[in-house]
């Protein structure tokens, strides 16, 4: 019994730092701030075709490093769960897609925000240098888990997304709000990239 309690305590101790970090992070604005005239709407994206054996984000990232091709920019992170056979994001493929997405998100005001993300299959999202979303492996469209972020000032914040979809349906969505009860889909109008 003592060994079991020790194992549980060690497991909880190992989880606590991650849980604390996942609950509140401060984002860093782009420095220098880009000029609105230098930006285009939406987010830049590059695609790679992944082998059917890929089951993790790390494997998908390796495929992107080997070879990726620019795709049409995506308007934002508002891709609801597709039907089988539908294209993934703006790619021409319906399966075995890895995407490297980059650009900026513009916060119109400083303050605290609660964020959450849906994805299928794997996703890692960094905003302002902080990981704000991570959900890996093969799964149906599901939430990564809420995180509270502090935005120290209004302006543009760098955004990076690594994403993959192996087969079946696909989704990639971002929600935000003042708290868990007020989450809404983030509008495409606040995403930008350098053309």
Image (cartoon, rainbow, N blue to C red):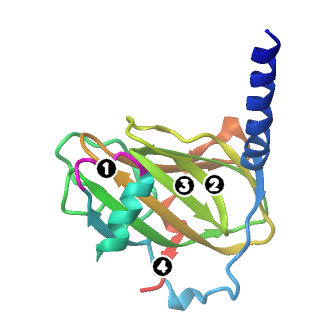
Q: Is residue 127 visible?
A: yes
Q: CA distance from mark 4 to mark 3?
A: 16 Å
Q: Of label 4 and label 3, which has the lower sequence position?
A: 3
Dot 3: within a 10 Å radius of its alpha carbon, few (fewer than 14), some, or many (20 or more) residues? some
Dot 4: within a 10 Å radius of its alpha carbon, few (fewer than 14), some, or many (20 or more) residues? many
Q: Of label 2 and label 3, which has the lower sequence position?
A: 2
Q: CA distance from mark 4 to mark 2?
A: 19 Å
Dot 1: within a 10 Å radius of its alpha carbon, few (fewer than 14), some, or many (20 or more) residues? some
Compared to residue 160, the image places residue 32 above or below, namely below
Residue 132 has which mark? 2
Q: CA distance from mark 1 to mark 4?
A: 29 Å
Residue behind mark 1? 54
Could you say where residue 87 lies in the image, as x and y percent from the top left? Answer: 22, 54
- Range shown magenta: 51-56
Residue behind mark 3? 186
Q: Residue at x 41, y 67 (%)?
A: 100
Q: CA distance from mark 2 to mark 1?
A: 23 Å
Could you say where residue 89 lies in the image, as x and y percent from the top left? Answer: 31, 58
- Quadrant the C terminus occupies: bottom left
Residue 193 has which mark? 4
């Amino acid at each position: 019994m003592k060994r079991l309690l020790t194992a549980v305590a060690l497991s909880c101790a190992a989880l606590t730092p991650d849980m604390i970090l996942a609950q509140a992070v401060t984002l860093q604005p782009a420095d220098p701030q880009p000029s609105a005239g230098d930006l285009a709407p939406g987010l830049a994206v590059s695609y790679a075709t992944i082998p059917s054996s890929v089951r993790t984000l790390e494997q998908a990232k390796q495929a992107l490093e080997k070879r990726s091709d620019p795709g049409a920019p995506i308007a934002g992170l508002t891709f609801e769960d597709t039907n089988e056979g539908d294209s993934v994001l703006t790619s021409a493929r319906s399966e075995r897609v890895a995407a490297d997405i980059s650009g900026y998100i513009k916060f119109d005001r400083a303050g605290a925000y609660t964020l959450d993300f849906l994805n299928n299959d794997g996703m890692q999202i960094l905003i302002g240098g902080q990981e704000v979303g991570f959900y890996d492996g093969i799964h149906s469209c599901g939430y990564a888990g809420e995180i509270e972020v502090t935005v120290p000032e209004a302006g543009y914040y760098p955004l990076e997304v690594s994403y993959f979809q192996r087969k079946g349906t696909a989704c990639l969505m971002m929600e935000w709000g003042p708290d868990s009860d007020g989450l809404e889909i983030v509008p495409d109008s606040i995403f930008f990239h350098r053309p």
